[in-house]
């Protein structure tokens, strides 16, 4: 019995020391005291074993002893196995800052640090802009007209965006911009996201573009000239980074600039001769100024730097620069936002065109990754969150008014599942973008969270749109002016692909950057290795070992509910925060285990890296939801959505860990990690059906939760504006309860055969019920109006037989001409373009639209914007 008690005491004592990361001395004390006690109490075996363990701790853990023999060997081994960090990777690692992501990586997150990022919300000026200017811009958009008839936004909308300085949200007021906070930028883009073309057009100049680069790195002369012109739309910018051979691997750009002398404005100056080919450049066809990334060389040492390869650099080039080929268009899937190629062959520019001047030559990669860390957090994640808002409103509304089997499909459990998923992913997305934007307003430059938000939320967007299409069925698989969802659905791959493809971001960036950038010790250990500082390595390494043991102890004990973290949340949120802390410890342990067991090979084990990134991503999103719950005004029904969202994220985090354990090459290590981190098995299962039913009911009725989820969407419909389906659904849901009661009355009457058998349409039921006295005249009139509006929202467009034919039927037997011009563009469309310039016209529609402007090979060109 004494032996057992001493063993239990030793285990408990060591766990306490490990949890507190107290170091070797306390552990030595626990083992030595218990060992001596064993000898005194005649438990010699356990006493001797504990004393041996104490000696082992002393030899390996006490600084004066370990530095004599252990630390030098470990340092030599570390230098052999530590991954080499390239200069490109080092620049990326040095860019941005670490905040809450570092807390999660540590395994001991201090929730008070997250709460410290107070969120005052939008200013009155910012909210007014979202309410008014964004509503006006939204009301000028019709997806069908933009995508099919114009392949562009209306000219009046372009003018309005320029006039109201939508392109100058990030530009300070001193230069004529709006100087909006990151939260306001996000709110604007969420509201505009019901149309992909509009959101992209506004988002890109305020994200990765010349404006942000000029603000951070431009010379005073460049700022004073360009920023006012960018703010008011006199200049339309684009940024040319990607090309045929450089997509996700942006550092491999083959475009070059050679330092040389040339003639500029009639005089000889020192400049660059640029040769480049860029693709997928947003706003390129209409841009008046081009930001260009290229590799800069000085083979003749004209800059007197003594090096030929200067490095990646960025320049700002006016559109009319001689030799630059610009104006052609790509056709982005589902959304005709302006996007196209740019080419140049030995284009000469003066060195003054370098952003930041000669001082910033060769600093282009650092400039780009620092800008990406912020821009990637806002534009595409905000678009995804906004898409979720609109999909929630549209799909919930449709599911309530669409009746099958004499029942609103919103009351069918098969439909309720996708409705709940849409609402939860929208809720998580809204919380994540708003809370992360708030950290940016506090000065954080979130590199790792930007990768998390970009990849996770755009995947949510894709899943939300798929669920929304499934619920709508035939209503939105039929394209036309009435279809508010189909074109946006087809455009979702754009968000998945651009600004760092999701496959690359998930597999390489989230954990790949986070493992070094966010870890409390790894980056400093690598620095100690590079500087050959053995003493610094010794201190860092053994604190790192303490962290590993601490995370193991915390993960194991907290799985049993022992010593759970102190969290500043209410009783509803606290259990989720406490388990997030537990999983943070488990994640930290698994991350260290993967890095130790795989070493530099972890870079190639992308699926393992991705699963670790998935754990971190879900914990980060959960944290944002918890903070959102704490800080925002809650409404009836929100608790169900909050529980659903938290459980879904924790379930996903646990599943990623299980997948990690199943695939770690070292099976003994994998089994040990599984026992230590999940000794009782998985804790979180998918959300319960009762939550699903409650959420689906809320978003498909005129509820407070529905209104909260669709807040800051375009929910007004003024005279002269394009049709707004959100307004129409909101109006129908406001009367849905009254209509449902009448539907039940009519249904019972039909079952009792109190209505004529030949009355098969709802309108016929209403007439017969009024005649028989089942419905009052008032109720009958209400139901006729209600059914008319329902039918309007269920109706799809149809067209003339050959409306979609780019080649008229009369020319069907004419030989096809598929020769390509010297630019590689097909000439087959040159004749039909004139006949179908206005696009197919629906046979049944109350909408009218202007015909498209003059086309050139099917491409809209406007000289006023190209000037």
Image (tube, grey):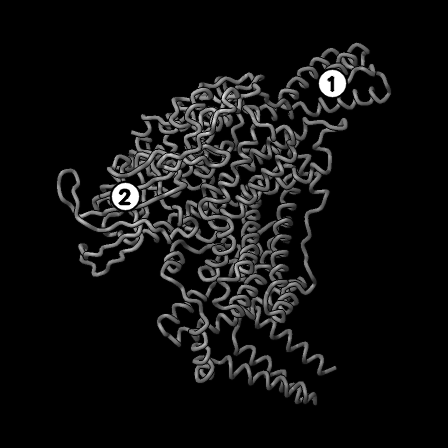
Q: Which numbered disc, 2 or 1, marks the residue that appears first in the sequence? A: 2
Q: Position of residue 367 (x, y in %)?
A: 34, 50
Give left or right: position of 788 versus 71: right
Please name the residue that numbered disc 1 is placed on. 762
Q: Residue drawn at (35%, 26%), measured in percent from left and top?
A: 862
Q: Position of residue 653 (x, y in %)?
A: 60, 55
Give left or right: position of 347 versus 242: left
Picture layout, residue 167 above or below residue 278:
above
The answer to whether residue 441 is visible is no
Q: Position of residue 564 (x, y in %)?
A: 62, 61
Q: Residue drawn at (51%, 72%), measured in percent from left and top?
A: 545
How packed is label 2: few (under 14 Cα within 10 Å), some, or many (20 or more)? some
Of tags 2 and 1, which is closer to the observer? 2
Q: Position of residue 265 (x, y in %)?
A: 16, 38
Picture layout, residue 197 above or below residue 257:
above
Disc assigned to residue 345: 2
- Helix, strand, or loop for circle 1? helix
């Amino acid at each position: 019995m004494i032996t057992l008690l001493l063993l239990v005491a030793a285990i408990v004592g060591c766990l306490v020391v490990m949890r507190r990361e107290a170091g070797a001395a306390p552990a030595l004390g626990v083992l030595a005291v218990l060992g001596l006690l064993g000898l005194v109490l005649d438990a010699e075996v356990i006493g001797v074993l504990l004393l041996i363990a104490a000696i082992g701790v002393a030899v390996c853990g006490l600084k004066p002893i370990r530095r004599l023999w252990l630390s030098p060997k470990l340092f030599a081994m570390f230098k052999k196995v530590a991954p080499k960090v390239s200069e490109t990777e080092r620049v990326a690692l040095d860019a941005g800052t670490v905040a809450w992501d570092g807390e999660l990586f540590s395994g001991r997150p201090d929730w008070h640090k997250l709460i410290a990022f107070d969120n005052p919300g939008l200013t009155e000026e910012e909210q007014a802009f979202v309410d008014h200017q964004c509503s006006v811009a939204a009301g000028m958009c019709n997806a069908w007209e933009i995508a099919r008839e114009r392949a562009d936004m209306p000219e009046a909308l372009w003018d309005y965006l320029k006039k109201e300085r939508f392109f100058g949200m990030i530009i300070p007021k001193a230069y004529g911009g709006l100087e909006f906070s990151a939260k306001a930028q996000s709110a604007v883009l969420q509201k505009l996201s019901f149309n992909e073309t509009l959101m992209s057009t506004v988002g890109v100049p305020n994200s990765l573009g010349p404006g942000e680069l000029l603000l951070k790195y431009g010379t005073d002369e460049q700022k004073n000239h360009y920023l006012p012109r960018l703010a008011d739309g006199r200049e339309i910018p684009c940024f040319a980074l990607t090309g045929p051979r450089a997509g996700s691997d942006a550092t491999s750009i083959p475009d070059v600039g050679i330092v040389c002398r040339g003639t500029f404005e009639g005089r000889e100056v020192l400049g660059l001769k640029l040769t480049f080919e860029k693709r997928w450049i947003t706003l390129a066809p209409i841009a008046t100024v081009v930001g260009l990334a290229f590799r800069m060389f000085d083979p003749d040492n004209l800059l007197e730097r003594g090096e030929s390869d200067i490095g990646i650099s960025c320049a700002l080039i006016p559109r009319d620069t001689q030799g630059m080929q610009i104006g052609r268009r790509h056709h982005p899937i589902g959304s005709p936002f302006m996007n196209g190629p740019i080419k140049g062959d030995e284009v000469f520019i003066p060195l003054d065109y370098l952003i930041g001047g000669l001082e910033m030559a060769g600093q282009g990669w650092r400039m780009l990754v620092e800008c990406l860390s912020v821009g990637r957090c806002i534009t595409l994640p905000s678009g995804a969150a906004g898409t979720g808002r609109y999909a929630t409103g549209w799909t919930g509304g449709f599911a309530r008014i669409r009746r099958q089997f004499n029942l609103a499909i919103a009351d069918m459990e098969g439909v309720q599942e996708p409705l709940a998923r849409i609402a939860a992913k929208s809720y998580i997305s809204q919380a994540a973008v708003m809370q992360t934007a708030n950290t940016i307003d506090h000065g954080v430059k979130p590199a790792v969270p930007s990768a998390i938000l970009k990849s996770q939320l755009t995947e949510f967007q894709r899943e939300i749109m798929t669920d929304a299409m499934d619920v709508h069925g035939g209503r939105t698989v039929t394209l036309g002016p009435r279809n508010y969802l189909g074109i946006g659905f087809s455009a979702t791959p754009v968000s998945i692909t651009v600004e760092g493809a999701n496959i690359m971001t998930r597999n390489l960036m989230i954990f790949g950057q986070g493992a070094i950038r966010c870890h409390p010790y790894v980056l400093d250990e690598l620095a100690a290795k590079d500087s050959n500082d053995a003493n610094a390595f010794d201190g860092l390494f053994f604190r790192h070992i303490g962290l590993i043991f601490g995370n193991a102890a915390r993960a194991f004990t907290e799985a049993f509910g022992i010593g759970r973290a102190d969290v500043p949340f209410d009783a509803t949120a606290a259990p989720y925060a406490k388990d997030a802390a537990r999983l943070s410890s488990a994640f930290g342990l698994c991350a260290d285990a993967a890095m130790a067991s795989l070493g530099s090979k972890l870079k190639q084990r992308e699926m393992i890296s991705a699963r670790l990134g998935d754990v971190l991503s879900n914990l980060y999103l959960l944290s944002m939801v918890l903070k959102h719950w704490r800080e925002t005004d809650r409404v009836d029904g929100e608790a169900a959505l909050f529980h659903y969202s938290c459980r879904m994220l924790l379930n996903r985090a646990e599943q990623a860990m299980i997948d990690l354990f199943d695939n770690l090459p070292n099976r003994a290590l994998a089994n040990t990690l599984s026992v230590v981190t999940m000794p009782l098995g998985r804790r979180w299962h998918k959300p319960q059906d009762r939550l699903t039913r409650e959420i689906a009911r809320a978003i498909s009725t005129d509820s407070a939760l529905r209104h909260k989820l669709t807040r800051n969407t375009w929910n007004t419909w003024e005279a002269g504006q394009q049709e707004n389906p959100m307004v129409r659904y909101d109006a129908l849901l406001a009367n849905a309860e009254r209509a449902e009661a009448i539907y039940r009355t009519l249904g019972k009457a039909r079952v009792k055969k109190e209505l004529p058998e030949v009355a098969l349409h709802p309108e016929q039921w209403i007439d017969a019920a009024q005649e028989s006295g089942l419905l009052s005249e008032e109720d009958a009139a209400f139901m006729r109006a209600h059914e008319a509006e329902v039918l309007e929202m269920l109706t799809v467009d149809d067209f003339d037989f050959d409306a979609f034919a780019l080649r008229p039927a009369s020319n069907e037997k004419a030989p096809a001409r598929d020769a390509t011009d010297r630019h590689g563009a097909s000439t087959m469309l040159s004749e039909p373009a004139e006949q179908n310039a206005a696009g197919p016209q629906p046979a049944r529609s109350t909408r009218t639209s202007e015909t498209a402007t003059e086309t050139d090979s099917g491409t809209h060109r406007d000289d006023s914007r190209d000037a």
